[in-house]
Amino acid sequence: MLQEDVFKKLVAHCKEYGFVFQSSEIYDGLSAVYDYAQNGVELKNNIKKYWWDSMILLHENIVGIDSAIFMHPTIWKASGHVDAFNDPLIDNKDSKKRYRADVLIEEQLAKYEDKIGKEIEKARKRFGETFDEKQFRKTNGRVLEYQQKWDELQARFVKALNDSNLDELKQIIIDQEIVCPVSGTRNWTDVRQFNLMFSTEMGSTADGALKIYLRPETAQGIFVNYLNVQKTGRMKIPFGIAQIGKAFRNEIVARQFIFRMREFEQMELQFFVRPGTELEWFAKWKQTRMNWHQALGFGSDNYRFHEHDKLAHYANAAVDVEFRFPFGFKEVEGIHSRTDFDLSQHQQFSGKKIQYFDPELNESYVPFVVETSIGVDRMFLQIMAASYAEEEIASEDGKKDIRVVLRIPAPLAPVKLAVLPLMKKDGLAEKTREIIDDLKFDFNCQYDEKDSIGKRYRRQDAIGTPFCVTVDHQSMEDNTVTIRYRDTMLQDRVAIGDLKNIIAGEVSMKKLFAKL
Ligand code: ATP
């Protein structure tokens, strides 16, 4: 199946099975804003718990906060967002569509990578086991030609970004003959900067309302609380502050479903360290975060690091964790060594001393910061994309059939088990209710009595429920039930009294934490 089709199916599945809805749908929707539905919110909460507990429970020196979305507007001056939180935009005069100039060029780079990839795949098929990719990359004429084009374009692009040279960005688009995907023409406007922050007013206009911003990242809420947390928690460096919360960006081009939204949620850690040790901590967090992703078991080939060519104004090292989405490798998480930029800026703009007295060194300094920043929504999309599978199976009447299953890791699954009476009569429904009443304090359970048992299993597969427990006549006699496993579809007969242990062992977050 084409990757584009996989993605369309995934989006449709998210709606049909109650994961994600378009915001304000009955009013024809609001662009790049989404609502999480009954199953989506459970998955999202579980993702947040996986992240939060991996920070707070597993690290003695990390604590959490929940700061307000509204903050003093000078914070965004100090952080550089008022002046520099911009994306370069360009319009196509024929289609009137707007694009990010940097993204158009990145897509052009990806085209060269694709071409190289295709040559390699063709050669791999031709040469079979004897194929030596390294050698082929060094010697094949076509690959070398594409690689040279890639290198030249990349060097020019990075220089233009570093120099903030908007004319050069436009010139690259023209020289590379990049066309608008809608109109197919090269009739471009100049490139302009566009600030991504939403603003609003606080207080009535009569009082002289204050222009404030919806935060474009949660990080600043942590920086401005650094002193409070350090003092009240008696924290000793190195230590971290974690936060989960909404962020808002007026994205120029918002495509690809929940990948790029205008209102989204971030999970951020700011880890405060002694100056000079930040690159060591950066390397450590890079690995820790990659392990966190890979513990989900979606295959290490589906992740890679992407080193930044252009560092943000505050960073001295930066890397993204990328995941292979149906539309290619894309960023899920950013890890940045933010130096002492933010705390120093707040020190300067607020006039308050923001320093740490290090008893071991017997000196005070502004701490350096390593940040890990991941989007909850992108993580959600990653899990949905990696979990979605269509499998050929034999149907009840023996014919071939397709089952759609979400292989969501059990600790993150929205519903942990469905308990199903084989039929409503003969006391089976009541027995089913008794089982749910016993298990509902530990797990999110669902009761379902409608349709054939096969159809009920399939409904649960489609929302990723790891266990289906079926109550039949034998259950009335010997207190046993069948338990069906989502991934293998195998069934076991077990005592009702053993269910709690069997399920708890599989759905506990401990299963994931043990791999970290
Ligand atoms: P991109 O290059 O894709 O715009 P970014 O580098 O600006 O992302 P960061 O500022 O590093 O992103 O934000 C950290 C994380 O927040 C990202 O890795 C991503 O998971 C998430 N994120 C950022 N912008 C959005 C958005 N518009 N919608 C959903 N998630 C987002």
Image (cartoon, rainbow, N blue to C red):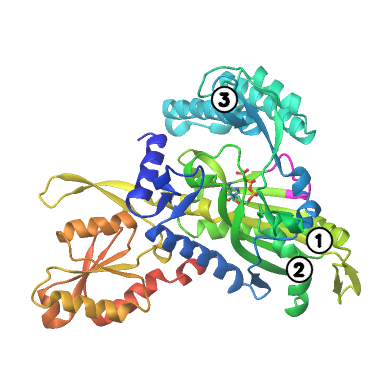
What residue sits 66% from the left and 73% below the top? 63
Which label was assigned to residue 343? Answer: 1
Q: Residues within 10 Å of mark 1 (few under 14, many from 20)?
A: many
Queried whether the magenta region covers residue 351, the answer comes back as no
Which label was assigned to residue 96? Answer: 3
- Location of residue 154 (image quadrant): top right
Reading the image, the residue beneath label 2 is 226
How many numbered callouts?
3
Q: Main secondary structure of the magenta part?
A: loop
Residue 453 appears anywhere in the view: yes
Say whether disc 1 or disc 2 marks the residue closer to the N-terminus.
Answer: 2
Residue furthest out toward the front: 206
- Location of residue 480 (image quadrant): bottom left
Q: Are marks 1 and 2 in contact (CB under 8 Å)?
A: yes
Which of labels 3 and 1 is toward the front?
A: 3
Q: Position of residue 275 (x, y in %)?
A: 83, 61
